[in-house]
Amino acid sequence: MAEAESAQELVTGLVASHGTQLRRFVFARARNVADVPDIVQEVYLRMLRISNADSIRSPEAYLFTVAQHVVQQHTMRQSATPPTIQLAQLLNEPATTHDADPGLALEAQQCLEGMQLALEELSPKARATFMLHRRDGLSFDEIAARLETSRPMVKKYLMKALLHLRLRLQQA
């Protein structure tokens, strides 16, 4: 029980003395400003889990080291999750034209919706690989570096995505 109280006292003191600096530190490193409060909270939670707070020689340095790790882990999780896009947004042409066939337009819309659903059914890594390769034109090596995986796994994810999308198109 004394260890928990010791950690709580440590965190309370750090919040009072370095709370503003910590928020600025995270703000400067976070990709999304909306994530700053969550990251700061995670830093304090990790600090509360310290089993022997009395053994920390420089609590301030430890706080910012923990913060750096939390920001890095958060950034890695965010980059591994592909951004959600709507396939209909990728079309540059207006949806309605004077000489467009309404039946053809409906069929195209249904096809896009089916492809969007099929993409959402993929695992996050397979979806990210597909989008990075087909939409962004990245090479296997670039995708492997971005997703922190191997080149053979990138190939596997892409093949899995292509096979899944092909099967879904055949079903439609």
Image (cartoon, grey):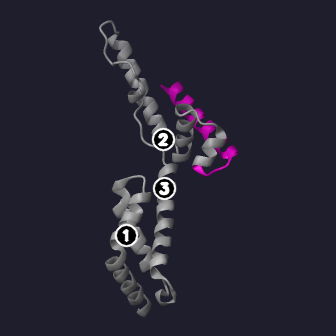
Which of pointers 1 and 2 lies earlier in the amino acid sequence? 1
Spot occupied by residue 33 in the image (x, y as percentages of width and height): 35, 55
**Mark 1 → mark 2, Cα distance in angstroms:** 42 Å
Q: Which residue is most to the right?
A: 152
Of badges 3 and 2, the one in the foreground is 3
Between residue 55 and residue 126, name the one nearer to us: 55
* Amino acid residing under circle 1: Gln
Between residue 150 and residue 103, name the one nearer to us: 150
* Amino acid residing under circle 3: Thr
Of badges 3 and 1, the one in the foreground is 1
Res. 114 image quadrant: top left
Spot occupied by residue 21 in the image (x, y as percentages of width and height): 37, 70
Spot occupied by residue 49 in the image (x, y as percentages of width and height): 45, 79
* Amino acid residing under circle 2: Glu
Left of 122 or right of it: where is 36?
left
Residue 162 is covered by the magenta coloring: yes
Quadrant in the picture for the N terminus = bottom left
Res. 46 image quadrant: bottom left
> Do labels 1 and 2 touch, CB within 8 Å?
no
Which residue is rendered at x = 56% and y = 42% of the image?
Answer: 126
> Which residue is disc 3 drawn over?
75
Spot occupied by residue 168 in the image (x, y as percentages of width and height): 51, 30
Which numbered disc covers residue 21? 1
**Mark 3 → mark 2, Cα distance in angstroms:** 24 Å
**How many residues crowd around disc 2 within 10 Å: few (fewer than 14), some, or many (20 or more)?**
some
- Placement of 58 over or under 119, stated as above or below: below
How many numbered badges does the structure rendering display? 3
- Placement of 93 over or under 55, stated as above or below: above
Residue numbers of the magenta segment: 147-172
Q: Main secondary structure of the magenta part?
A: helix
> Which residue is disc 2 drawn over?
121
Which residue is rendered at x = 29% and y = 8% of the image?
Answer: 98
